[in-house]
Image: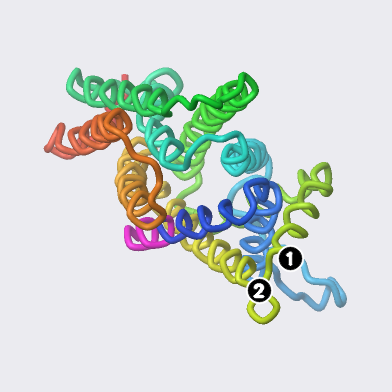
Amino acid sequence: MLSLVLGGCCTNVWAYERLLRIESRVGSALTFSQMLFITLQQLPSFITWKPSSGLLPRLKPRQVPLSQWLLQVVVLATGSLFNNWVYAFHVPLTIQIVFRSAGLAVSMLFGRFFMHKRYSIQQVTAVLLVSIGVVVATLSRPPSTDQSTDDLFEYALGVTMLTVSLALTGTLGMLQERTYQKYGPCWKEGVFYTHALSLPVFLFLIPQVKHGLGSLSEKSGSVVPMPYVILAANLVSQLVCVSGVNQLSSRVSSVSTQVVLTTRKAISLCFSVWWFGNGWNGQLGLGAGMVFVGSFWYTQIDADGRTGAGKKD
């Protein structure tokens, strides 16, 4: 399970960054492709052929009511689109990775206020360190002499989108935790329905999807369409990553899931800097260090097994 999260998600980030370097505004097309691929891959497991239904297949009975998945669909689709749009607003991927690591703090806040959990002073301090680290890293973008007001506005808009996406990720984790607690670890059903029901959203984004896929076609070689090879790698690794995260969410709390995801982001950040030579400075290093130290510190607190779960009021 951990190998799915760490291996699949890290590979996915690599392929994602390669695509963004080819076409920075591929976000809508990429999100649609991910949703469609995962839906088609999972579909055979959720349909059945019955003589009484004629030639048409039917969906198998659900373990979870459809209404429980609909809210998760809205949250997942919106958060995924924001995540894939951000790069076009001049937010470096290194900062995106560090910023998203604040999901641990968001999960804790949601756990406290919506699920009535209590956390120790040490846990709160560790998460506070993570939050401060995110702020330090976000403000580390080096100023440029030719930077215009429009560039700064776009960067601020990108950070705002990251913030909203972060809140949506925390909401999704909380909804998943509640669903799995009530109906059991039906993570495969969750993967299928949340992705399948997200597809109608893209009816409103057809021009952007066509533009993104068309841009990849224009930049493909005459023999090997490398952008589409990278897109295929992104889709497969996204499936592996999503499956791993949903399995993890079905077995542990949303906060514990965020601890694992933060570790994955640390690996992705180091790989991004090494492989792509992304910009690195002392302030970004300090912020990233605070995020990852805070995350690992959190895992060491409450060694009696209560780490990440909190206690109910």
Q: Secondary structure at mark 2?
A: loop
Q: Position of residue 232 (x, y in %)?
A: 59, 68
For marks 1 and 2 on the same chain, the one whose residue lies earlier in the sequence: 1
Residue 142 found in image quarter:
top left
The type of residue carrying mark 2 is Pro
Which part of the image, by quadrant, shows the N terminus? Answer: bottom left
Q: Is residue 308 visible?
A: no
- Between the C-alphas of marks 1 and 2, the distance is 8 Å
Is 8 left or right of 218, judged from the image as shown?
left
Residue 216 position in % (x across, y down): 70, 61
Return the residue at label 2.
225
- Find residue 41 and report its image quarter: bottom right
Q: Nearer the viewer, residue 90 or 199?
A: 90
Q: Is residue 127 above or below residue 252?
A: above
Check the image and name the residue furthest to the bottom: 223
Q: Which residues are magenta?
A: 1-9
Where residue 131 appears, as percent x and y from the top left, is 34, 23
Q: Secondary structure at mark 1?
A: helix
Residue 213 vs residue 243: left or right?
right
The residue wearing badge 1 is 217
Q: Is residue 289 magenta-colored?
A: no
